[in-house]
Amino acid sequence: IKSKQDEAGVKYDAGKYGTTLAFFQIKQPNGITQGNIFSVAGEQRNRGVEWSVFGEPVRGLRLLGGIGYIDTKMSNTGNAATEGKEAIGVPNYTLTASAEYDLPFVPGLTVSGRYIQTGSQQANATNTISLPSWNRFDLGARYTFKAAQMRYTMRASVENLADKDYWASSYGGYLVVGQPRTFKLSMTVDY
């Protein structure tokens, strides 16, 4: 499957602050799944805009946020019931905001938080079933230290802090369940 993408944007980076703005259009064959058969029926066009901002307003506090809007359309499908409809599994908007803070009283310790929200999305080609928008909060921490001439980073996080039930996405007649509250621990060593 071959796609064509056009994109134009601008980026401003002033060191401690910055922003990006991009406009895009993607045209690709519209894939559909009926029963156990995948086929191509027409074209899917995704057109949108993405804006993000980042910065460090005070020492040790880093912020990142972004919003995206996507307008999708299926064309030349050969089926009046799907012609001009929204594509399956593409939310009409996404929103993210994250922050991390280096705790000054514990050198090497950083705490973080993230908020994610997506707009509604279609669950079938005729757009008669849609998935509602959803949001979730994540929290995390990392601790970096040196020992024996190596750098260690330990990470802990909780994703979907509120343990919300949600449908994350849809494709080909299948719904993808959003992950429940998930705890993660990891450690990396740089030598």
Image (cartoon, grey):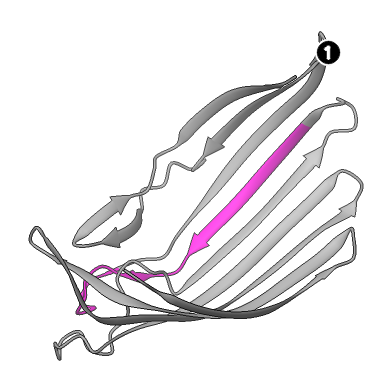
Residue at the spot 77% in from the left edge and 25% down from the top edge: 144
- Mark 1 belongs to which amino acid? Gln
In the picture, the quarter occupied by the C terminus is: top right
Q: Reply above or below: 11 against 6.
A: above
Q: Is residue 64 left or right of residue 104?
A: left
Instruction: Decide which of 133, 1 is in the foreground and name it.
Output: 1
Query: Relative to the observer, which residue lies in front, 67 or 45?
Result: 45
Which x, y percent locates residue 77? Answer: 20, 85
Q: In this rendering, would 94 be left or right of 106?
A: left
The residue segment tinted magenta is 110-130
Image quarter where the N terminus lies is bottom left
Instruction: Name the side, left or right, on which 142 lies relative to 96.
Output: right
- Identify residue for label 1: 149
Residue 126: say if magenta. Answer: yes
Query: Dot 1: within a 10 Å radius of its alpha carbon, few (fewer than 14), some, or many (20 or more) residues?
Result: few
Q: Is residue 101 above or below residue 55?
A: above
